[in-house]
Amino acid sequence: MNEQGPPPPDRLPLLPGFREMALRRMSAERRALVRELTAQRQSAGLSQTEVAARMGTSQSAVARLESGDADARASTLERYAAAVGGHISWQLHAADPPAVSGQSAVSGQAAVSGQPSALRQPADRSQP
């Protein structure tokens, strides 16, 4: 048997309950994003079937996504946003530091924006 020694010094210790807390928060944020996407679809006058055709998927997959229970990939949410005439912008924000000193954490946020008649183009980041 191969016994493992102590963790390397550069490895962060586990924080009890952190995973569950993070999953709950991400789930709530993802559901809010999906609600916003669904509202944008409805205001654009699109059916789930039309959105599914634009995304290259089935109506039932769109219904599962809109239920808010699916753990959708970021690329799926981005395709949905594009199909309803929107764009998801991702931002990373610093979070409150955890209780253990010397460690930091970050949290993310996504927002949907767009106009049903045109898609936003990604910003040109080649300029300084």
Image (tube, helix red, strand yellow):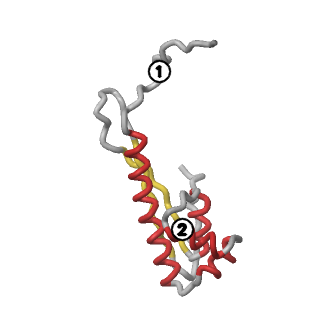
Residue 18, percent from left and from top: 38, 39
**Residue type, mark 2 in image:** His
**Residue type, mark 1 in image:** Asp
Q: Is residue 1 above or below residue 125?
A: above
**Label 2 Cα crowd, 10 Å radius (few <14 / some 14-19 / many 20+):** many
Q: Nearer the viewer, residue 18 or 93?
A: 18
Q: Which label was assigned to residue 10?
A: 1
Identify the residue shown where x is 56% and y is 52%: 127
**Label 1 Cα crowd, 10 Å radius (few <14 / some 14-19 / many 20+):** few
Identify the residue shown where x is 57% and y is 12%: 3
Q: Which label was assigned to residue 87?
A: 2
**Circles 2 and 1 in contact, beta carbons < 8 Å:** no
Pointer 2 or 1: first along the chain: 1
Q: Is residue 112 above or below residue 100?
A: below
Which image quadrant is residue 74 in?
bottom right
Q: Is residue 94 above or below residue 32?
A: above
Name the residue at the bottom extreme: 45
Q: Is residue 4 above or below residue 66?
A: above
Say whether residue 90 is left or right of residue 84.
Answer: left
Q: Which label was assigned to residue 47?
A: none
Identify the residue shown where x is 56% and y is 76%: 85
Residue 72, percent from left and from top: 56, 59
Q: How much space separates mark 2 and mark 1, taking CA atoms?
A: 38 Å
Residue 37, percent from left and from top: 49, 72
Local SS, label 1: loop
Say whether residue 51 is left or right of residue 37.
Answer: right
Identify the residue shown where x is 28% and y is 33%: 99
Local SS, label 2: strand
- Tell us which disc is closer to us: 2 or 1: 1
Residue 39, percent from left and from top: 46, 77
Which image quadrant is residue 58 in?
bottom right
Quadrant where the N terminus sits is: top right
